[in-house]
Image: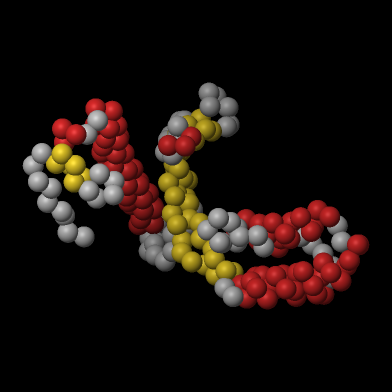
Amino acid sequence: MSEINIPEGFVRNAVGHLVPFDQVRDQDKLRDQVARQLTDEAKALSLALKNFKKKALGDVADLISIAGERYGVQMGGKKGNVTIATYDGKFKVQRSYADRLTFTEEMEVAKVLVYGCIRAWSEGADGHLMAIVDRTFSPNRNGQIKTADVLDLLRLEIDDANWKAAMQAVKDSIMVLESAVYIRVYERIGDSDNYKAIPLDLAVV
């Protein structure tokens, strides 16, 4: 998108109109200033976090490689979850991988099979089970079925051939979209065996 040239002495408002700067209210100018300053700081923090993650992943990979060389092992393939800690155990860093899941069109088949089981069981079906099923197949605001609810459904052990067929359809509908990697840093709480996470998320700082 090409940058629009704004004549000197004018600013653009939110709908794209040019407004003489001296006609902008002081409160609007102040709001604009604060929003821009915070945005600039947020961008700097985002870049710092990105650089930290890149460095952390590189350092952990180097540590694994050095350990492999020491024992004459060639490290390769998909990397797994790793925890490294300071010598005194006060701090530890975890690298973990998690698959991001999505569901194919077979989930619609699974939905029909599951509700078929519920209807067949009629009043004998547990009310809590019905609530779990309804929650599982209710999409979120983005129209997506929540992965955690699907996995909860798969954990139910019900000795029924139709239910097992339905659960197989659920399993067949699961597709790994991508694998995400996370870096988490922890600090020991006093002399206990418990650790608290060092927040890297604005929501929990």
**Where in the figure is residue 81, as x and y percent of width and height?**
49, 53
Would residue 205 appear left or right of 162 to someone viewing this image? left
Would residue 188 appear left or right of 21 to someone viewing this image? right
Q: Is residue 126 above or below residue 30?
A: below
Would residue 160 appear left or right of 51 to someone viewing this image? right
**Where in the figure is residue 53, as x and y percent of width and height?**
35, 47
Depth check: give the residue in front, 51 or 86. 51
Q: Quadrant of the N terminus?
A: bottom left
Would residue 155 appear left or right of 198 to someone viewing this image? right
**Where in the figure is residue 168, as x and y percent of width and height?**
70, 73
- Taking the image as drawn, is residue 146 in sight? yes
- Taking the image as drawn, is residue 55 in sight? no
Q: Please report the residue visible at 79 percent of the width from the left and 59 percent of the height from the top.
A: 130
Q: Please report the residue visible at 39 percent of the width from the left and 53 percent of the height from the top.
A: 64
The quarter holding residue 150 reads: bottom right
Depth check: give the residue in front, 53 or 146. 146
The quarter holding residue 38 reads: top left
Q: Please report the residue visible at 48 percent of the width from the left and 34 percent of the height from the top.
A: 204
**Where in the figure is residue 89, as x and y percent of width and height?**
48, 33
Q: Residue furthest top?
A: 190
Q: Is residue 170 above or below residue 25?
A: below
Callout count: 0
Q: Residue furthest front?
A: 23
Q: Residue furthest left?
A: 8
Name the colouring of the figure.
secondary structure
Q: Quadrant of the C terminus?
A: top left
Q: Please report the residue visible at 81 percent of the width from the left and 70 percent of the height from the top.
A: 117
Q: Is residue 195 above or below residue 51?
A: above
Q: Is residue 126 above or below residue 49?
A: below
